Image (cartoon, rainbow, N blue to C red):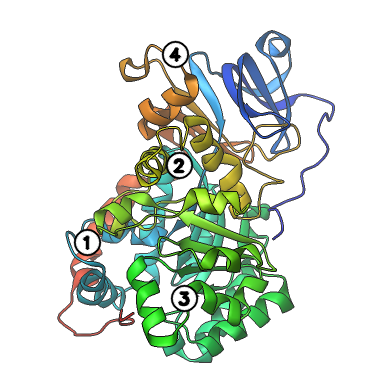
Amino acid sequence: MTPSAAPPPAGSAGSADLVVTGCTVLLHDDRERIVFREDAAVVVRGGVIDSVTSAAAAEAMPARERIDARGQVAMPGLINCHTHAPMAALRGLAEDLPTEEWFNDVVWPVESNLTARDVELGARLACAEMIRGGVTCFADHYFAMDTVAAVVAECGLRAHLGQVFFSSQGDRGREESLEFALRHRGGAGGRITTALAPHAPYTVDDAGLAATAGLARAHGLPVHLHAAENRAQTDASLARTGVTPVEVLERTGILGTDVLIAHGTGIVERDLPVLARAEGRTAVATAPRGYLKFAWPTTTPVRALRDLGIPVGLATDGAASNNSLDVWESMALTALVQKSAEGDPRWLTARQALHHATLQSARALGLEQAVGGIAAGRRADIVLVDLTGPHTQPVHDLAATLVHSARSSDVRTTIVDGRVLMRDGELLTLDVPAVVRELGERLPALVDRGHGRRVQRYDT
């Protein structure tokens, strides 16, 4: 995968574009361990972090814009490694249902009603929510993605986008996914990267997956898909075909590409050597809130994957299943669920959770050279978190405070490529009331299920 843009050299002369000063900065040392630098300043030029210095050294530095961040922590922007942003329009529509009924009885019938305008409005609402919650980059996998790309370009976020397809669409679905990926690769001034987006091994047949792998290699594109989402899918695949969904990815060549696997709670012991020998770059995105809500019996095997060197990024999935695009919550839940799953309170530590939320998530999208850390030469994707509230005081362990006490609502300022998208809690690039009004007017037609159609059938 290619980073969103090659950063210009740091240390360019002249005034800084932005100086964030007086804050505590979350950094990674040369062994990628989380460290904190107090009373510091971050200097930004040309959308790139020029330096991290002391607040005193930055005091007299000329700058077009300054942010006084005393009492706040400057962190790398959070990355939502797998979501369906337009599904914010379906939040709360399908509740307290098993997976099969959730898909077949509600979500896929409703999605057959979607227009490009519905997708745009859902994406606008989602982007506003993510900016408010300190998310600076998201990986999206949905329909009518030209509209999502346009929203990303307008609102200032960074995104990794793929247009989903099923085998039921014939070859045309795959061709449109490729056309989208090539059309928007490097878009929005380099803030958009793209992927091919087959839905899953249970909705795209082996021939379609093999063709996708060939296109990915031919065009230098990664693949983003659902696979081994839950244990039931793995058991059904073994019963029907004798192989797991992960083994399907291997035999069809998908694991010979750079691939991002969504969920992976159905990854089993026999899959681990398959993933270990994958020729391409393999990553997994975990979204634990949805697994708890669907009462899935297992979760993403983060520890086993990390032992293989496979990055696990944090995600929310869509708001139709998670009700939220809060990656802060995903970070805390990942730490707690992993402790429970492993029966070990020493795993996942707060510092490990922060690592998954920053560098590991960037690595999962192939963007680790550009984002995921606050350091000279990286893109200036930064969030400022206010820790002065009673729920975050006193601070004995700053990493634990960030993971287990702070909330997404404590994010005060969100910056992408050096551009301030939210300052002191005020969104600067999206008009949420206008989106909510229009979406409300469109909801009756959107949620109608009387037609008996659905975009696909869930039958693993």
User: Under tag 4, what secondary structure?
Assistant: loop
Query: Which of the marked residues, 4 or 2, is nearer the chain's N terminus?
Result: 2
Q: Nearer the viewer, mark 4 or mark 2?
A: 4
Read off the residue under disc 3: 244
Horizontally, residue 250 falls left or right of residue 348, namely right
Q: Which of the numbered marks, if any, corresponds to residue 396?
A: 4
Q: Are marks 2 and 3 in contact (CB under 8 Å)?
A: no
Residue 259 in view of the camera: yes
Q: Is residue 355 above or below residue 163?
A: above
Q: Quadrant of the N terminus?
A: bottom right
Read off the residue under disc 2: 131
* Whole-number angstrom distance, CA of label 4 to CA of label 2: 28 Å
* Whole-number angstrom distance, CA of label 3 to CA of label 4: 45 Å
User: Under tag 3, what secondary structure?
Assistant: loop
Query: Which of the marked residues, 4 or 1, is nearer the chain's N terminus?
Result: 4
Q: Residue at x 47, y 75 (%)?
A: 245
